[in-house]
Image (tube, rainbow, N blue to C red):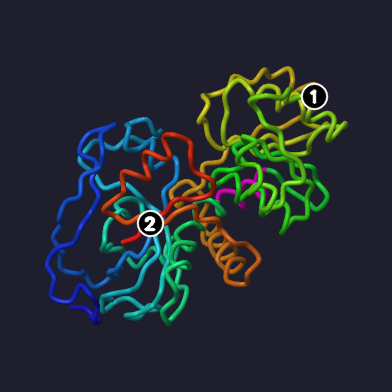
Amino acid sequence: MSRRGLSAFAGRVSFKAAQCQEWKKPLVLVNKCISPLKEDEVRVQTKACGLHYATYLATRGEYQVKRDPPFVPGSEFSGDILEVGREVSGLSVGDVVAGLAKTDALQEILTLPSSMLEIGSLIKISSSPIDDENYSKLASLVVNYGTAWMGWTRKGLIKEGDTVLVTGASGGVGLAAVELASKIFKCKVIGMCREEKSEQVRNFGADHIIDYRSESIRQEIKSIAPSGVDIVFDVVGGDGAIDLVKSLAFEGRFITIGYTAGIPKIPANILLLKSATVSGLWAGTATTPPGVFKETANIITNLFLDGKINPLVQEAIPLERVNDGFEKMGAREVIGKLVIRM
């Protein structure tokens, strides 16, 4: 049994989903049946689904955790509660929510276990409607800003006045890392990105920009921070990571987040000579210690609701054009975040 609400889906028995039927091929819109709601579940009308690079890799069979087709990709979402199981407390029909599903977020309706509330992967935002722009921004929070927050605080041990460097600074996670480091932690921020994307990175708080394509990374860093950088937040990897480790200050911290340019091989002797630390971060509900993900999700959500951070949504793309979004991600044309609107 459930407590039902009125919506555009009242009386319908199916909904649209974007399905990966074959790796490296365009997604296909399919109809899926609405299943009966269990007593400990909630039903969400998805308003927006955030795209991030891991989603793109998953549809190509290139992500660390592989899923065999057919499957519906996507994890980060925002929407409205349509239906609430009898055993669920803390949520009501019409509530605005955001969160991080394990899978299947690129579809018009999500059916989720209420246990997601307990671990912080489902967050109540409001009891009243919000505008479309904020649905898009809410679908851009948890992955990007949650990853950046945990990276800075748990791995980087960031403090006010640190000099930090962010690679891939124009991307979703990179831009979030820049904004948090500058506006919340009051650090000196060096952003690495293409020159044509630098304006937005500066707008989000970067004090200096290094274009990795045309400049000597080590020379540029040395001119900006003669004693080296305290923390490197690296979402790119590749051979350039070695130069970044060499550019660390004594007892500097290097945080490895992703490998869009390949997995680097970092010489251990450099770490020894600098007494430096390399830490990996895979931020998610399954990999983060109990309570940490929920605390992080609440902090990030409150910073957004208080107007202290403001995710950049480059474009909100209709579900019918979902493949346009994946093409832009593959072509590295994205600054900030793309979202799919339902």
The quarter of the displayed image where residue 212 is located: top right
Horizontal and vertical percent position of residue 70: 20, 41
Secondary structure category for the residue under label 2: strand
On-image quarter of the C terminus:
bottom left
Answer with left or right where residue 48 lies relative to residue 224: left
Task: Say the numbered circle drawn on residue 191.
Answer: none
Q: Is residue 148 magenta?
A: yes
- Where 89 sits versus 195, above or below? below
Badge 2: few (under 14), some or many (20 or more) residues near its Cα, within 10 Å? many
User: Picture coordinates of residue 246 (x, y %)?
Assistant: 75, 23
Task: State left or right for residue 237 relative to residue 30.
Answer: right
Residue at the location (33% across, 74% down)? Answer: 81
For the stretch drawn in magenta, what is the main secondary structure? helix
Residue displayed at 38% across by 56% down: 49
Q: Residue at x 52, y 30 (%)?
A: 259
Mark 1 crowdedness (10 Å alpha carbons): few <14, some 14-19, many ≥20:
few
Compare marks 1 and 2 and give the one earlier in the sequence: 2
In the image, residue 340 lies at what x, y percent?
A: 36, 55
User: In the rendering, which numbered label is found on residue 219?
Assistant: 1
Which segment did they paint magenta? 147-155
Amino acid under disc 1: Gln
- 59 in relation to 322, above or below: above
Q: Nearer the viewer, residue 1 or 172?
A: 172
Q: On the image, numbered disc 2 is attached to which residue?
A: 49
Residue 3 visible? The answer is no
Name the amino acid type tagged 2: Cys
Residue 291 vs 85, above or below: the answer is above
